[in-house]
Image (cartoon, helix red, strand yellow):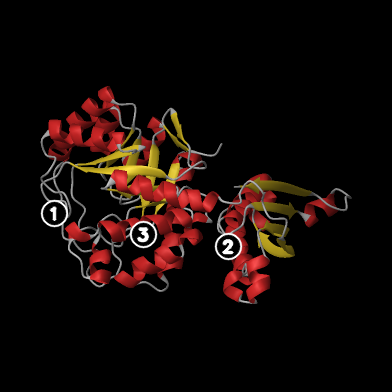
Amino acid sequence: MSGWRCGDRLLPTGERTLIMGVLNVTPDSFSDGGQFLDPAAAVEHALAMVAGGADIIDVGGESTRPGAEPVSEAEEAARVVPVIRALAAQSPVAISIDTTKAAVAQAALEAGAVIVNDVSALRADMAMTPLVQASGAGVVLMHMLGEPRTMQEHPRYGDVVSDVTAALAGWAVTAEAAGIPRECVALDPGIGFGKTLQHNLALLHHLRTLGALGYPVLVGPSRKSFIGTALGLGVEDRLEATLAVVAWCVAHGAAVVRVHDVQAAVRAVRMTEAIASVGKATPPADRVVLRGLEVFAFHGVHPEEQAKGQPFLIDVEAWLDLAPAAHSDDLSAALDYSRLAATLRSVATQQRYDLIETLAGRLAAAVLAEAGVTRAVVRVAKPQAARALGARDIAVEVVRTR
């Protein structure tokens, strides 16, 4: 079973989409500011979300809405710690602390939280990375352009999907290099955080690109202003549109969705999953095969391999139903092997691994992130190493399904 490691828990991200309920104990959050400042009211609402199907409760004591002003560590901790302590005593639900401050995160973890949801991706407070590493907590690395006070002032990107994906990949590698286990890391594209309407729509449309990195993807679209911009709706009228975005995220590989309206979201998620599950018991025998994709990279256990690099040969089988493409003769119904090759090349070169077993697993995750693919067979060969041993071939082959 695949999952997201959060302290002593393994949240089952491979089985179903997890629901993270939003609990803002702030006076100024954009949607529910001031409603749950009283700890008793906050805990009552959290328990109602758990009863409605929430897998995680995300507690925040500082608003990150556009233009929000920061609050002190002491004030933020005073808002969240009593709520987390009381909730942990009354429910086994996984609790997340939404903060960029290490001192607040530490107090929250000591009170019972098991996840640190950091909108700065561990960059705002230098003490946050060692805290997360030492605690073993799960961590959400979110993309944000600038800071809450300024992030919506003319946000610009070269290509928002490539830029956000590359930034998150880099921050994840940095976290792992600091000792945070890969299995503890989840990534969030940061919908609404330094993005225009078109930026947000593009990130949602290409959500599988982020998923191809192999980390659980968390998306928080709930009631956000991009929905209001797209449809001309106030915060109180964004439920249906939020659920539409949630269903899209589930259908395109999100592991976790962060929402205010938990019960409604649970129903939308489970219905989407029910539709997506049809036919999984009898996977198609059709496949797209890509053989001999050559990349030059720096994987290997030996220092010489890491310093000089070497060629790798990649073979891939992507199992999916090709009948729709065969019937329509329409490229949109087919697996775009050109895009797949580019994705595989990116995965194989963006990070260094000691073992080609690890590389093969990451490549298989990228193949499974493609729409309709139910089974991936990936073979990674090291022709240079084979020649050095007098062998014809050295390779690792992995098989992954969903």
Mark 3 highlights which residue? 245
Mark 3 or 1 closer to N-term? 1
Q: Position of residue 248 (x, y in %)?
A: 42, 59
Q: Secondary structure at mark 3?
A: helix
| Gap between marks 2 and 1 measured at Cα | 38 Å
Cβ–Cβ under 8 Å for marks 2 and 1:
no
Q: Position of residue 151 (x, y in %)?
A: 24, 63
Q: Which mark is residue 346?
A: 2
Instruction: Identify the amino acid type marked 1.
Output: Glu
Task: Answer few, some or many: residues within 10 Å of disc 1's Cα (few below 14, many 20 plus, some between 14 and 19).
Answer: few
Instruction: Identify the amino acid type marked 3.
Output: Val
Q: In which quadrant will I find the N terminus?
A: top right
Q: Is residue 131 above or below residue 366?
A: above
Q: Secondary structure at mark 2?
A: helix
Mark 1 highlights which residue? 69
Viewer-closest of 252 and 199: 252
Instruction: Identify the amino acid type marked 2.
Output: Ser
Q: Could you tell whether 239 is left or right of 315 in the image?
A: left
Q: Position of residue 267 (x, y in %)?
A: 37, 47
Q: Which mark is residue 195?
A: none
Q: Is residue 214 above or below residue 114?
A: below
Q: Is residue 57 above or below residue 334?
A: above
For image coordinates 88% across by 53% down, the residue present is 392
Q: Position of residue 30 (x, y in %)?
A: 17, 55
